[in-house]
Amino acid sequence: MGMSEDKVKEHVVMLEPEKENGTEAMLVRSDGHVEFGVMGRAREGQDLRGLDLVQLAPHANSPVVWNVKERTSFRSEGSQSSGPAKVNSKAFRDNYERIFGGDDDALPN
């Protein structure tokens, strides 16, 4: 899982009023790049794969603009697959054959 942290204080988030399914947000990075998304509160036990976890601090000049204190991304970098890691080592294959076998006659039942 690609996990990266971004601690640049110049990033700001502009928030729309809260709605039932979250709050629409616009992230403006210090390099001028703009990202749009929906922001909601993190909940204990929530799967964060594919999401960003953002810690905000109030901006001095506006109630709808927030400073980004920290941003941690749980997005996969360069991979579109999901699920457990794909193990493809010789030891895994040998044990797989030993446990599940390839020959039905070798099974004890």
Image (spheres, rainbow, N blue to C red):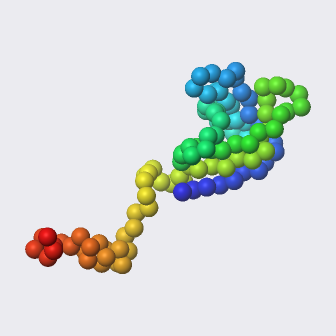
In the image: residue 74, left or right of residue 5: left
On the image, which quarter does residue 41 sit in? top right
Q: Residue at x 40, y 63 (%)?
A: 86
Check the image and name the residue furthest to the front: 109
Residue 40, image x and y in percent?
Answer: 63, 33
Residue 24, image x and y in percent?
Answer: 64, 27
- How many marks the image carries: the answer is 0
Q: Residue at x 70, y 42 (%)?
A: 54
Q: Residue at x 36, y 78 (%)?
A: 91
Q: Would you place residue 34 above or below residue 107 in this image? A: above
Quadrant for the C terminus in the image: bottom left
- Asked whether 65 or 10 is in front, the reply is 65
Residue 11, image x and y in percent?
Answer: 77, 41
Q: Would you place residue 92 above or below residue 36 in this image? A: below
On the image, which quarter does residue 42 sit in? top right
Quadrant for the N terminus in the image: bottom right
Q: Residue at x 59, y 50 (%)?
A: 74
In the image: residue 103, left or right of residue 17: left
- Asked whether 54 or 104 is in front, the reply is 104
In the image: residue 97, left or right of residue 85: left
Residue 31 visible in rendering = no
In the image: residue 65, left or right of residue 34: right
Residue 74 visible in rendering = yes
On the image, which quarter does residue 77 sit in? bottom right
- Asked whether 79 or 59 is in front, the reply is 59
Residue 5, image x and y in percent?
Answer: 69, 53
Check the image and name the residue furthest to the right: 60
